[in-house]
Amino acid sequence: MVSDASAVDEELALGLLAGDEASLAGAYHRWSPLVHTLARRSLGDAVEAEDVTQQVFLGVWRGRSTYRPERGALPGWIVGITRRRIADALAARTRRGDLLAAAGAELALAEPAAGRPEAALDRVLVRRELARLPAPQRRVLHLAFYEDLSQTQIAERTGWPLGTVKSHARRGLHRLRTSLTSTHKDEISAK
């Protein structure tokens, strides 16, 4: 005999799979207190827990086609998403802490007349993203911006054809722009 709760869970799961927004609302009503409690206990912050709860149910809606009832019940699937979102929130918190520590160290070394304090954070972000570039792109951009060499001078110093230097510079700048734009969006959404 199937309990009423199991029948409701199964109905919500089938509705979600069919793309029924009312089923999403039902799932949110039914399991958001559990999700919020798990997030609050793990993160120790009510605001972050609210954000995680929203992210979980957004993930439920977006990932509904990946839910497989034969692999487990809907509440278990939602708790799995919750655990991943909590881990993401903790990782983001750690990254923000590392970034702040690096920016603080940079500020301590900066000249007082250097201007705006956020410039230190900008430098830290750019250095971090530069370090993630492939070695040839990183080298070309370093020579261009930190040693103030032209592309022709970079080609002479590295022994690479001018076209190769230009390609590395273009690809490196594109990657930097993409990653810094993404980082900036992440920082804004984290606030």
Image (cartoon, grey):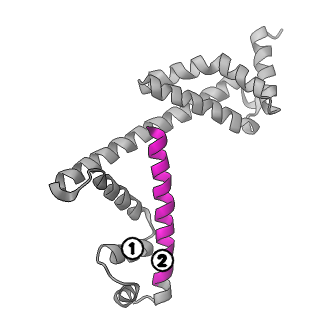
| Place of residue 178 in the rendered image (x, y in percent of width and height, measured from the top left) | 51, 60
The chief SS type of the magenta part is helix
Residue 121 image point, x, y percent = 32, 52
Residue 73 appears in the rendering: no
Q: In the image, which disc is placed on residue 141? A: 1
Badge 1 amino acid: Leu
| Residue drawn at the location 30% of the way across and 51% of the way down | 118
Q: Residues within 10 Å of mark 2 (few under 14, many from 20)?
A: many
Q: Residue furthest left?
A: 112
The tag on residue 168 is 2
Span shown in magenta = 165-191
Residue 4 colored magenta?
no
Q: How would you rate the neighbour count of disc 1 (Cα within 10 Å): few for under 14, some for 14-19, many for 20 or more? A: many
Residue type at the position of mark 2: His
Q: Secondary structure at mark 1?
A: helix
The CA span between labels 2 and 1 is 8 Å
Between 17 and 54, the one lying in front of the other is: 54
Q: Look at 75% across and 19% down and name the residue there.
A: 9
